[in-house]
Image (cartoon, grey):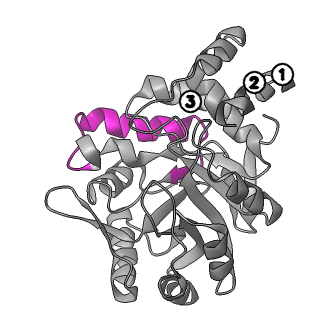
Amino acid sequence: MTNKTITLADDLTITRMGYGAMQLAGPGVFGPPKDHDQAIAVLREAVELGITHIDTSDFYGPTVVNELIKEALYPYPADLHLVTKVGARRGDDGSWIHALEPDDLKSQVHENLEHLGLDVLDVVNLRTAAHDGGSEDSIAESFTALAELQQEGLIRHLGLSGVTITQIREAQAIAPVVTVQNLYNLVRRQDDDVVDYCAEHDIAFASFFPLGGFSPLQSETLAKVAARLNATPQQVALAWLLQRSSTSIVIPGTSSVAHLRENIAAADLTLPADAVAELNAIGA
């Protein structure tokens, strides 16, 4: 990959290879990590290896992951950008609860600020839907609430998560959108049109669950391509995403320093045209 960074705004340049902090929480993204010291080590290693883009949310844990990030990295390096999201809360049983009312969204922003130890958030994504894709419901009221906090100076930039092109356009009519974060990977290609729309409009498209999520990607073709390139299947899957469009970014998560290093190495892997063609056929 030739371009390892992407500029989303005059004051926002991030590495296209990011780090998704969700897996630092306990099982089911709920409760404390299995190994606190290892979680701290992973965060510090990510920054040490040059990652300037960490994806998080206060509903990871809840609060656990943001508090780990603050413990590990505060005071934050000047070039490190934390991208958080709002739009959900967690039940006492670990359930995920939609929380999109304007007053609740504003409370969630303040909670993210508090637990990260910040006065302003670099990017806040509005999470509108679960992992299986968005609906066409209007997001105007919810996005307007975040735009108001942006005007107040509590948020620098706004993004979206789990959305359709219709919803992106609706949000763009309210305030600039710098990033869209949807479920997308070699196998889950339903959002090809969203990836292309984002590239056309200079919006970063962040693939979450780039390696399949809680069920890792399984593909004979992927394994064969990886073996031919002397890389792991996970590295090839990440490299494919980074080459998918000029504005693609990835946020693979892990609670292991070794896996973190493997993931980051994918940013140095350039896939030849024949490999890309083989991989494209997986999701066809």
Residue at the location (45% across, 30% down)?
216
Q: Taking 72 as reference, is 204 above or below it?
A: below
**Circles 1 and 3: CB atoms closer than 8 Å:** no
Secondary-structure class at tag 2: helix
Q: Taking 118 as reference, is 60 above or below it?
A: above
Cα distance in 3D space between marks 1 and 2? 6 Å
**Label 1 crowd bin: few (<14), some (14–19), many (20+), radius 10 Å:** few
Cα distance in 3D space between marks 1 and 3? 22 Å
> Dividing the picture into quarters, in which one does residue 91 lie?
bottom left
Q: Nearer the viewer, mark 1 or mark 3?
A: 1
**Circles 1 and 2: CB atoms closer than 8 Å:** yes
Asked whether the viewer can see residue 153, the reply is: no
Secondary-structure class at tag 3: helix
Q: Position of residue 144 (x, y in %)?
A: 53, 88
Q: Position of residue 283 (x, y in %)?
A: 65, 36
Point out which mark residue 263 bears.
Answer: 3
The quadrant of the rendering that contains the N terminus is: top right
Q: Where is residue 203 in the image (x, y as percent from the top left)?
A: 72, 63
Residue at the location (71% across, 9% down)?
228
**Label 3 crowd bin: few (<14), some (14–19), many (20+), radius 10 Å:** many
In magenta, the rendered stretch is 30-54
Which amino acid, mark 3? Answer: Asn
Which amino acid, mark 1? Answer: Asp
**Label 2 crowd bin: few (<14), some (14–19), many (20+), radius 10 Å:** few
Q: Given the current orientation, which residue lies at the most extreme left position?
A: 92
Disc nearer the start of the sequence (1/3): 3
